[in-house]
Amino acid sequence: MLDAEILSELLDAVADADLARKRAREVRTLRGLRGVPDGEIARVAAAAWSETPPSLADEAELSTLFGTAFEDGLIAVGLLAALLPDAPHEVFDIAQDWLHRLDDVLTADAFGWLVLGPSHLATGTPLVPAPHDAHVAVRRATVMAAMAFLPHEIEGPAAAPLRARLRSTAVRFVDEPQREALRGFLEVAIHDPDPSVRKGLRRILVAWALCDPDAAEPWIHQVRGGAPKMLREAVVKSARKGRRLASLQD
């Protein structure tokens, strides 16, 4: 059985107050910050999966962990992501609940990429952008979910449980860009006015252009209503780089 309190104690033991103060400049969450380095978060998360793998019966403990502190939440996200192959529909339902509890963009990034996006892929449900009146963290998570539609290796400390489960440091959810799903989703999401959401969109578009330049670049020039200049320039630059890298591999 998963014990959220024990995991929180492990994190607290390696917390650093100075790091918490520094991280507070970029992470603003009502849950609070312990100040745990990413490497330690990943270590605790991987050990939690390897030593006592949770199951859906641990949903309440996972939910408690998710709401305890920033670092605890990242581990909860990672453990939920590692459960997805066993019960995609159940994880999808949990993801819909947790989505509306998000209040910081870094947790939103991990949650979108590792849980929300893959659960949409696994269940066959379309990914729909969050409405513009939703909390910015919810919108950012929905945007970052599209990273799961790209052959990009997962990153960050929350990825540790899934890597531990698959015994691989190079994990990705698809082998080829899911072009149709991306196009339909991005046509709506690209008009979100919030700078934080656009930062997430830029990451998606850059990743797409690097691996699929001949699809991403024409699309950005054909966006209805026109794409923001910052995003358009990022895609053009990344597409150029993507073609150059591809030519070196030929």
Image (cartoon, rainbow, N blue to C red):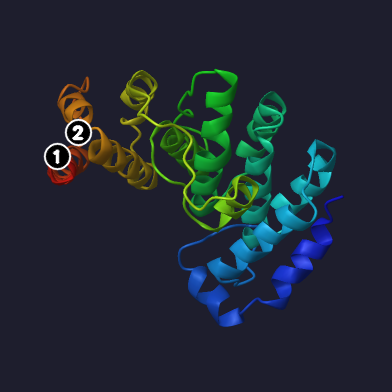
Q: How many circles with numbers are drawn on the protein?
A: 2
- Residue 131 on image: x %, y %: 47, 28
Q: Is residue 219 above or below residue 194?
A: above
Residue found 38% across the figure and 34% down from its top? 150
| SS class, disc 2 | helix
| SS class, disc 1 | helix
Q: Please tell me in which quadrant of the rendered image residue 230 appears.
A: top left
Q: Nearer the viewer, residue 162 or 18?
A: 162
User: Can residue 245 be seen from the camera position used here?
Assistant: yes
Question: In front: mark 2 or mark 1?
Answer: 1
Residue found 61% across the figure and 79% down from its top? 16
- Tell me the residue that label 2 is attached to: 213
Amino acid carrying mark 2 in the image: Pro
Q: Please tell me in which quadrant of the rendered image residue 198 appears.
A: top left
Amino acid carrying mark 1 in the image: Arg
- Tell me the residue that label 1 is attached to: 243
**What separation in Å lies between label 2 and label 1 (alpha carbons)?**
7 Å
Say which quadrant the C terminus sits in. top left
Q: Is residue 3 above or below residue 90?
A: below
The answer to the question of whether label 2 and label 1 lie on touching residues, with beta carbons closer than 8 A, is: yes
- Residue 77 on image: x %, y %: 63, 47
Q: Nearer the viewer, residue 21 or 168?
A: 168
Residue found 80% across the figure and 53% down from its top? 52
